[in-house]
């Protein structure tokens, strides 16, 4: 359950409108469960084509009920895409649809693969290196592509495998070769710094994506307040 005081504090610090929307929708569903069907499909058959993986910062005060850690500062969770906005998938929703969390995760991976196959990979070549991004109609679904099982096959062919990626917000995502990072570093840091301070922030980390999964290589801009060492000094 999300505490209103924690939600207010989180919004004041980050401007993350998504947490407010999710809180309101949960309150509305609790007060009028019969009226929440317009947002949540009643059947799994209706919902399954709209389940995706998403990514957001790790914040113990505003965690979805279903999530797993990606890096120290970011998590992966399940969303339901609706005409109005994307909402967190909850255990109550899975119970209503009579599916397990594992089944929902499998469908999210399959939907990510389908979306990746349908989406153009745009490649921009410059004097300092080559950057790729996806031409998504709904740019908030970038993380669904990142977690698609076929991501390496589709993107690694062009940028090598493993490769590097950054996702400062849910709709700002780019990939590039590990070999190009040395010459692209200043541009990548500027990209992350310019877009991280946003209502849909994800992570300011440089991510390595490869056969072993996703891991953080380094924090490109310090937005996490890890200054304990400085305080000790």
Image (tube, rainbow, N blue to C red):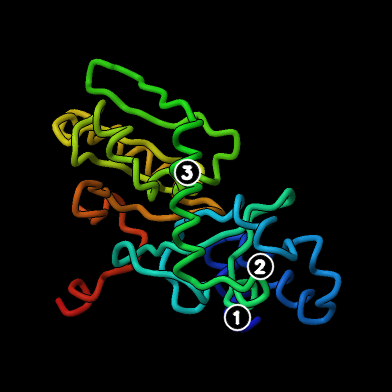
Q: Earlier in the sequence, mark 2 or mark 3?
A: 2
Alpha carbon distance from label 1 to label 3: 26 Å
Q: Give yes or no for contact between labels 2 and 1 (Cβ–Cβ under 8 Å).
A: yes
Q: Earlier in the sequence, mark 2 or mark 1?
A: 1
Q: Give yes or no for contact between labels 2 and 3 (Cβ–Cβ under 8 Å).
A: no
Q: Give yes or no for contact between labels 1 and 3 (Cβ–Cβ under 8 Å).
A: no
Q: Please tell me which residue is depicted at 21% across the width and 46% down the height of the picture.
A: 210
Q: For mark 1, what is the residue?
A: 2
Give residue 22's mark.
Answer: 2
- Residue 209: where, in percent of width, then height? 25, 47
Q: Earlier in the sequence, mark 1 or mark 3?
A: 1
Q: For mark 3, what is the residue?
A: 142
Q: Secondary structure at mark 2?
A: helix
Task: Check disc 1: other Cα within 10 Å, few if <14, some if 14-19, many if 20+.
Answer: some
Name the quadrant of the N terminus.
Answer: bottom right
Residue situated in front as seen by the camera: 156 or 204? 156
């Amino acid at each position: 359950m999300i505490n209103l005081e924690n939600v207010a504090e989180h919004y004041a610090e980050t401007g993350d409108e998504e947490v407010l929307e999710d809180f309101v929708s949960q309150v509305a569903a609790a007060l009028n469960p019969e009226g929440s069907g317009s947002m949540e499909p009643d059947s799994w058959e209706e919902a399954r084509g709209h389940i995706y993986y998403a990514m957001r910062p790790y914040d113990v005060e505003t965690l979805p009920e279903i999530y797993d850690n990606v890096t120290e500062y970011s998590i992966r969770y399940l969303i339901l895409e609706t005409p109005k906005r994307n909402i967190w998938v909850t255990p109550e929703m899975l119970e209503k649809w009579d599916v397990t969390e594992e089944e929902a995760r499998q469908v999210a991976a399959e939907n990510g693969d389908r979306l990746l196959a349908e989406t153009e990979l745009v490649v921009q070549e410059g004097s300092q290196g080559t950057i790729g991004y996806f031409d998504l109609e709904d740019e908030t679904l970038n993380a669904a592509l990142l977690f698609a099982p076929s991501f390496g096959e589709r993107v690694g062919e062009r940028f090598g495998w493993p490769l590097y990626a950054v996702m400062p917000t849910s709709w700002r995502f780019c990939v590039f070769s590990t070999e190009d990072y040395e010459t692209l570093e200043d541009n990548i840091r500027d990209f992350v710094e310019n877009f991280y301070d946003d209502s849909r922030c994800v992570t300011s980390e440089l991510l390595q994506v490869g056969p072993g999964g996703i891991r953080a290589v380094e924090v490109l801009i310090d937005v996490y307040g890890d200054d304990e060492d400085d305080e000790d000094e």
